[in-house]
Image (cartoon, rainbow, N blue to C red):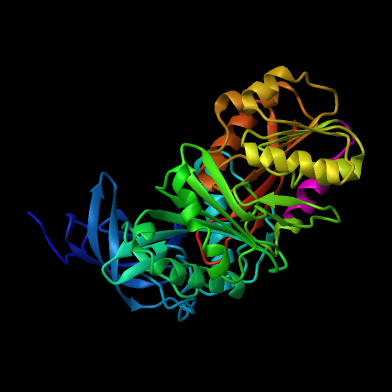
């Protein structure tokens, strides 16, 4: 029998039930953990110390997921959100939590994720904070043609509905202004705007140059119809169109911005991967380089445009092998090595597995791993460990997959001696972690 609003130890939870619980701690992906009748209940957008009312939307063996209905007693760390789109927009889950509490929550979440994966870390975890506003250099937003006109923004949490955004606090004033002008310019072209899917925008760290790439359902022969945007959208220095099936057509200006890094000249294509936080990307690069000891050959796997490979080569003067599969990023890495006179950088545009198999290990070798959110496959872990490098620096944006991979490396004799957090994504649940692994630690 369904027993709604019952909170004793015998409570049974069913979808649609309402409940009250006190949140014990933050868990990954912006959820708070409470308990009802011995059952764990996850409630998004809640924080340690909150007393909340929530409605059950999913029940599993041992746990349930509930949607927040109201905060009955707020935690002392709560604040009034500075963003008018909270909680509709799915972009930031910590906007109404004080920033120091956010950092503490992220450290706690990282420690728990590592412990749950069998790779506990009891040592210190220094945390590098970021300004909360204007930190993004790159962003992806969605278009939606509604009855009320063209929308441009982020998707509402848990839905496909696009929340039209006038000003995102993650973006600079220049980026917000350019996006508003873009939406206005397209609003009078319904035939075109209905075939737009999204926009990628990239801004230089100093905020002076912006390029955009539109994601569309247009054919290659139709992309030129968007050339009018060059004239009607101020603040845009380059314009391109993704026309599907891997084809990209550049219409005007340059697809690159400049991102100076530790005294080096670095170009970044709008479609190349590059760290998003303008305030911390150099500090992240400096830390990775500083954590790699010795002078042996370095392998930078998942190298992007060379954010780590180039400073390594500049410091050591030796060979650095940068492995990157994405065409635009690999082209950027080659151009960046050439423009900085770093002849020791060898860029391999290939899958990491193939590159490792075709590159013989050397004594004193050092390896950087900066994989996507999914982490490193077991085969890659095996290949890296078999090379017996002097050190591995692992850069991760996902605590659960990081914990899994650290446990795999530990089984092969590589354990952490340093763990650091960089809050590259303030107000969101994401966090960047840098871990150094050494053999026999």
Across and down, in percent, residue 125 comes to 67, 55
Q: Quadrant of the N terminus?
A: bottom left
Name the residue furthest right: 317
Residue 289 part of the magenta segment: yes
Left or right of residue 435, residue 251 in this image: left
Q: Residue 285 at x, y = what percent? A: 76, 51
Residue 239 in view of the camera: yes
Q: Residue furthest left?
A: 1
Indicate the position of residue 342 as horizontal and vertical percent values: 88, 40
Q: Which quarter of the figure has residue 127?
A: bottom right
Magenta residues, as a range?
284-296
Specify the quadrant that holds the C terminus: top right
Eyeballing the image, is 14 above or below 92? Answer: above
The reply to whether residue 48 is in sight is no
Q: Residue at x 59, y 65 (%)?
A: 103
**Viewer-nearest residue: 398 or 56:** 398
Report if residue 54 lies within the magenta region: no
318 displayed left or right of 190: right
Which residue is pictured at 38% across the width and 60% down the height? 193
| Left or right: residue 199 compared with residue 202 | left
Say how many tags the image has: 0
């Amino acid at each position: 029998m369904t027993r709604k609003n019952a909170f004793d130890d015998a409570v049974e939870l069913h979808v649609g039930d309402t409940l009250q619980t006190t949140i014990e701690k933050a868990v990954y992906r912006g959820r708070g953990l409470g308990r009802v009748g011995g059952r764990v209940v996850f409630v998004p957008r809640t924080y340690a110390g909150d007393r909340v009312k929530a409605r059950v939307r999913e029940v599993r063996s041992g746990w349930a997921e509930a949607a927040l209905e109201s905060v009955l007693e707020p935690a002392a760390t709560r604040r009034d959100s500075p963003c008018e789109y909270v909680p509709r927009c799915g972009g930031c889950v910590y906007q109404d939590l004080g920033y120091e509490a956010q950092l503490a929550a992220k450290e706690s979440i990282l420690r728990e994720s590592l412990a749950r994966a069998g790779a506990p870390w009891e040592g210190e975890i220094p945390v590098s904070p970021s300004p909360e506003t204007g930190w993004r250099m790159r962003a992806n937003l969605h278009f939606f043609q509604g009855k009320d006109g063209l929308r441009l923004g982020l998707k509402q949490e848990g839905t496909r509905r696009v929340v039209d955004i006038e000003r995102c606090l993650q973006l600079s004033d220049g980026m917000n202004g350019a996006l508003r002008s873009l939406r206005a310019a397209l609003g009078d072209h319904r035939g075109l705007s209905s075939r737009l899917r999204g926009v990628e925008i990239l801004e230089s760290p100093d905020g002076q140059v912006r390029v955009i790439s539109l994601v569309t359902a247009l054919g290659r022969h139709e992309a030129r119809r968007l050339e009018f945007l060059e004239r009607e959208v101020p603040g845009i220095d380059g314009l391109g169109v993704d026309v599907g099936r891997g084809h990209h057509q550049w219409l005007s200006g340059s697809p690159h911005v400049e991102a100076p890094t530790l005294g080096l000249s670095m170009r970044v294509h709008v479609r190349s991967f590059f760290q998003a936080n303008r305030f911390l990307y150099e500090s992240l690069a400096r830390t990775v380089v500083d954590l790699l000891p010795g002078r042996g050959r370095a392998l930078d796997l998942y190298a992007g445009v060379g954010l780590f490979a180039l400073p390594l080569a500049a410091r050591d003067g030796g060979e650095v092998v940068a492995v990157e599969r994405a065409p635009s990023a690999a082209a950027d890495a080659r151009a960046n090595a050439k423009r900085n006179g770093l002849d020791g950088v060898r860029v391999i545009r290939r899958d990491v597995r193939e590159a490792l198999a075709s590159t013989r290990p050397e004594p004193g070798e050092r390896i950087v791993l900066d994989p996507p959110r999914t982490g490193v496959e077991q085969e890659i872990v095996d290949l890296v460990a078999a090379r017996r490098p002097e050190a591995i620096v692992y850069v991760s944006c996902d605590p659960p997959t990081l914990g899994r991979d650290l446990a795999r490396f530990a089984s092969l004799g590589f354990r952490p001696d340093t763990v650091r957090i960089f809050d590259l994504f303030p107000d969101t649940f994401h966090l960047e972690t840098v871990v150094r692994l050494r053999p026999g630690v």
